[in-house]
Amino acid sequence: MATKPTNSSAFLDAMKHRHSVYTLNDKQPISDSRLEQIVNDIALSVPSSFNTQTTRLVVLLRDQHREFWNIVKAVLRPHAKDEEGAKKTEAKLDGFANAFGTILFFEDPGPSKAMQAKFPQYAAHFPDWSEHTSAMHQFAFWTALEAEGFGANLQHYNPVVDIPTKQKFDVNLEWQLRAQLVFGGVEGEWPAGKEKKPLSETVKWFGKK
C-alpha cells in the first residue's frame, strides 16, 4: 500500500518544474531499474473512465529509441516539399534521436468498445474518455521523468508512422498511437516557463469564503 502524502507541495512543485526541453542528450540521471519502477507505478496508478484501462505503453531506450526516430525520418522524407525542407525536418528528428528514450502512448479501443455495448447511453463518449486517459498518462510521465532529472518533450508524429512502428516493435495493429514522449539528459540551461493567461480568464470560483 502506498504511503499517504502529507500535502500536495511536492506534486505541485513537480508540475511547475515541467517544461518542454528540446536540447537533450543520451545521458540518464537514473538507473534502468528506477525508470522501470516509475513506468510501472504510473501504469498502475493513472485512472480511466469505468476502469477501462485503455492506455498501452511501449518504452524504447538507447538503440531501440534511435530506431524509432529512423522510422519517422524514413516515413516523413517523401512528404518534404523540397530538399531544404527535408534537411530541416531530419535535423529536428536527429535532435530527438540524440536523446535517451521515447515512450510511445497507444490506446487500445477494445475496452471502450466493450463498454459502448454495455452502456449504450454513453457510447458516444467512450472514445473521448479514452483520450483523457492517454493525456493523463502523458502528463504523469512527463512530470515524473523531469522530476527525476530528465528533460522531455511531447511529439505527435502519428498516424503517418503508425504502421511501420507497429511492425517494427510487434505492437497490436488495433492499438492507436497517440503521442511520443522523448526524454534524455539536459544540455544547457533549463527552459523558462511560457506566458500563461491571467487566472481571471481561466478560473471561476463560486462559494469561496
Image (spheres, grey):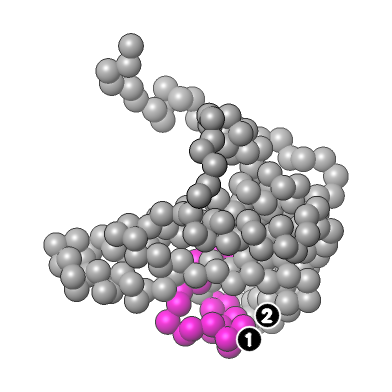
Q: Is residue 47 left or right of residue 24?
A: left
As measured in the structure, the alpha-carbon distance from the residue carrying label 2 to the one carrying label 1 is 9 Å
Residue 174, magenta (yes or no): yes
What residue is rendered at 54% in x and 42% in y? 3
Asked if residue 203 can be seen in this view, the reply is: yes
**Residue 172 to residue 178: above or below:** below
Q: Secondary structure at mark 2?
A: helix
Q: Which residue is mark 2?
A: 71
Q: Name the one closer to the observer, 1 or 88.
A: 1
Quadrant of the rendered structure where residue 49 is? bottom left
Residue 161, magenta (yes or no): yes
Dots 2, 1 in contact, CB < 8 A? yes
**Residue 160 to residue 41: above or below:** below
Asked if residue 194 can be seen in this view, the reply is: no
Q: Amino acid at mark 1?
A: Lys
Residue numbers of the magenta segment:
160-183
What residue is rendered at 50% in x and 66% in y? 178
In x, y percent, where is residue 93?
73, 67
In x, y percent, where is residue 140?
55, 50
Q: Residues within 10 Å of mark 2 (few under 14, many from 20)?
A: some
Q: Name the one closer to the observer, 153 or 34.
A: 34
- Mark 2 or 1 closer to N-term? 2
Q: Residue 168: which numbered mark, if any?
A: 1
Q: Is residue 37 left or right of residue 200?
A: right
In x, y percent, where is residue 83?
75, 75
In x, y percent, where is residue 203?
39, 27
Q: Secondary structure at mark 1?
A: helix
Quadrant of the rendered structure where residue 60 is? bottom right
**Residue 24 to residue 58: above or below:** above
Q: Amino acid at mark 2?
A: Ile
Placement of the C terminus among the 4 image quadrants: top left
